[in-house]
Image (cartoon, rainbow, N blue to C red):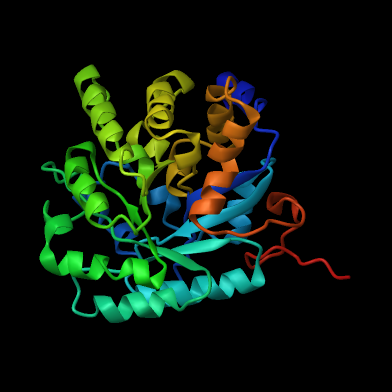
Amino acid sequence: MSGGPHREAEQRLPDFPVVDAHHHLCNLSQHSYPWLERPVEQGFPYHGDDRPIRRDYLVADYLDDVGGIDLIGSVHIENGAADPRRETAWLADVMRAAPIPSALVAKVDLLADSAAEDLEWQAAQPGVRGIRQILSWHPDPVYTHTSRPDIIEDPSWLTNFSRLAALGLSFDLQIYPHQMEQAVVLARTFPDVRIILDHAGMPISRTEPGLDHWREQMRRLARCENVVCKISGIGTQDHDWTVDSIRPIVLGAVEAFGPDRTMFASNFPVDRLYSSFTRLYAAFSELTAAFSAEERDQLFASTATEVYRLGPVTGLPLCRRRTRRGGHPRRRTM
């Protein structure tokens, strides 16, 4: 990330508060993450060679990446740990000792026999605002994350999905454009569940027909008022991205959902494979330069604050707090 264009982009950092609506932390000494343990000889999934991120990624590491961004909050999305309850318990401890994350989205397999019990347990944990179960299925195994294309239609899965509203839980939905018709049915069936579309609907085809299909499906899904969109995973879908290459994705998502139902997010450390945090947010800032101050606030902070119920934000920007070894920011004493 040392090229001239990258340095120039980082000079255009947003000069207003930011809530990162999608990032991960990783503690390899305490947890097993099967997706990071895939044998190299089996090759790598669509996000590419992930060996550089097969290491601990704690609060201090994340805040170092944030750099000069005026970060005021963040949302931790489950990181594919083998034991989701243990991951949530660890993150609750992190939240008690550090200023971020501000909220958690936990993992529950809604097909599991224990799903109802798991949902109740996760909903009772401090900071948990929602659930994610990755449903992105693709006929090419390099791109698929699940074993079946029809999980979202499974009666048992739907029964457990129906429990979310009563528990006050949202659902982070990670799917491809060809699955959005199923998502429309889901959203209309459960209008009381807030659904967050991850990674802008994962438009991996950047051909004109591919982008046209994505735009059409995004518009259809956006008609469901309980669905919001998260623009994230930029580098996992476009390893050599530039401001111009991601322009149709960013502006297309905002056009479909509107700034009040769209939010920016980093997907770090996964997207760290392809960009610095500051370069990513400088690109978001450049692409929205013509937007109003209110619209930019919605995209960069207030939509995420409302969707994930972060509450009032007080204190200094989180990224500017000094950190100590061990991964937690140093607290000020009165």
Which quadrant of the figure has residue 212?
Answer: top left
On screen, residue 259 versus residue 81, left or right, reads right
In the rendered view of the protein, which quadrant contains the N terminus? top right
> Vertically, is 77 above or below 304?
below
Which quadrant of the figure has residue 95?
Answer: bottom right
Name the spot of residue 218 as percent of width and height, x first.
Answer: 29, 34
On screen, residue 64 versus residue 128, left or right, reads right
Q: State the residue in front, 102 or 312.
A: 312
Name the spot of residue 143 as percent of width and height, x first.
Answer: 21, 43
Q: State the residue in front, 301 or 319.
A: 301
Q: Is residue 227 visible?
A: yes
> Vertically, is 225 above or below 289?
below
In the rendered view of the protein, which quadrant contains the C terminus? bottom right
Name the spot of residue 267 as percent of width and height, x first.
Answer: 45, 47
Q: Is residue 232 visible?
A: no
Q: How many marks?
A: 0
> Vertically, is 69 above or below 166?
above
> Vertically, is 89 above or below 28?
below
For the point 34% across and 62% down, which residue is it? 80
Q: State the residue in front, 88 or 291.
A: 291
For the point 34% across and 59% down, which residue is it? 192
For the point 21% across and 27% down, which residue is it? 213
For the point 24% across and 18% down, which residue is it? 208
Q: State the residue in front, 289 or 223.
A: 223
Name the spot of residue 205 as percent of width and height, x first.
Answer: 24, 28
